[in-house]
Image: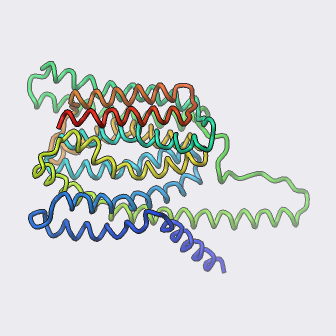
Amino acid sequence: MATTGSSESYSGQLRSYLHSPFTPLLFFVPLGLVTAHQGSGTINPLLIFLLNGLGIIPLANLISSSVEEISEHLGDQWGGCLNATFGNLVELVVAYSALTGGLYEVVLDGLVGGLVTNLLLVLGVAAVVGGMRFRQMTFSANTSLLNAKLLLAVMLVAFVPSTLLHFGMFQSSQHHREYSTLVSVFLLIFYGLSYIYQFFTHGTMFSSSSLPFATEELIDSDDESSHSNRASESSESASEKTSLFAALTVVIITTVILVFSSEALVDGLAASVQKFKLSNFFTGVFLLPLFGSAAEFVICLRAAQRNRMDLAVATTVGSSIQIVLFVLPLLVLIGSFIGHPLSIFFSPEAMVAVTASVFAVQWVTEDSTIDWFEGAFLVLVYVLLFASTFFLL
């Protein structure tokens, strides 16, 4: 009986994941892989890029839905970190594919694009949508202060190595690569320390006031009532395990498919850049992240509609911080290991984009509140940067 109930719950949860407006786009997953297999010599590479990009959107939605289910058991703080990590999975896979293909500028610009898109477009649109239902949305003040410090670290990473290189302070490109490798090691250590700080040594400062599935202590002198409560808790525990297993299954399977679709996406992008002479900066910062940030966009919109801005901020700002303090140094170390060395270097236009994004988000979130007007301001900054890139084409 319990097995049958668990099976029904499992299948019901899988059906709920597929009950989404993005589900019809799953048709583009096999279509994009087939066209990529035919090769860009016979098929327009831009078509390959678009088909696989459309296929990534429903895959990202499946990941976001399953990760959101996992976060329901852990609270907004842990859930936001998981959302940021799995949301950046697309960027990491795409960046790795571009790195192995020697598209170093696309790798760096794509990471900057993920940061700009999450901080400005995703958080801005979510604030506008949520602000239509709630007059003012709040989130943790301690989280806001920690994010401000980490965003300052992001700006320093974008400025210090790049400024030194622009002024010719390195003896050679090899010297700069060694410097980037050393900095990457310390960035990964620092990012790990930030997790220890917010979840362990100072965890009480950042913990949610309540968890969705926290166990409530019920005191009842009646033995029959107590027995009934224990049975109910046991049934609920089994249901939670089933939902967690279903969510993890969806994440694993979708991730495997996502790897192949992302590789096809990058192959089509590389051929399109060469064929149509597209700007690497425009492609990496604004075109590629539209698909890579699909998971964060879906998660953030859902959170804002429920007035769960702790989850929305942890997903968007946390994702952007993770891109520079974790994904970038990880790619630098991987690149040096596989023979495709990547240096920490941001172009002047990328430095401007990072600075504008960080200052805009810091201004909006410094009082631990956000509304639709502040969301519109973030979208305005994104549009300003987007329009400005046309002068770079």
Q: How is the image coloured?
A: rainbow
Identify whether 168 is placed above or below 282. above
For this orientation, the residue located farthest to the right is 222
Q: Which residue is nearer to you in this view: 78 or 221? A: 78
Q: Quadrant of residue 254?
A: bottom left
Residue drawn at 68 percent across, 64 percent down:
236
- Exactly how many numbered labels are in the figure? 0
Screen quadrant of the C terminus = top left
Judging depth in this view, the residue of 366 and 322 nearest the camera is: 366
State left or right for residue 273 relative to residue 251: left
Residue 157, image x and y in percent? 30, 28
Quarter holding the N terminus is bottom right
Residue 276 image offset from top left, x and y in percent: 12, 50
Residue 134, given in percent of the width and then of the height, sits at 63, 41
Position of residue 21 in the picture relative to residue 102 (left or right): right
Residue drawn 70% across the image and 65% down it: 234
Q: Quadrant of residue 77?
A: top right
Tell me residue 167's x, y (percent): 15, 18
Residue at image position (56%, 40%) is 310
What residue sits 64% from the left and 48% below the top?
A: 211
Say above or below: 246 vs 283. below
Residue 265's quadrant in the figure? Answer: bottom left
Vertical comparison of 203 with 250: above or below? above
**In the image: residue 36, left or right of residue 121:** left
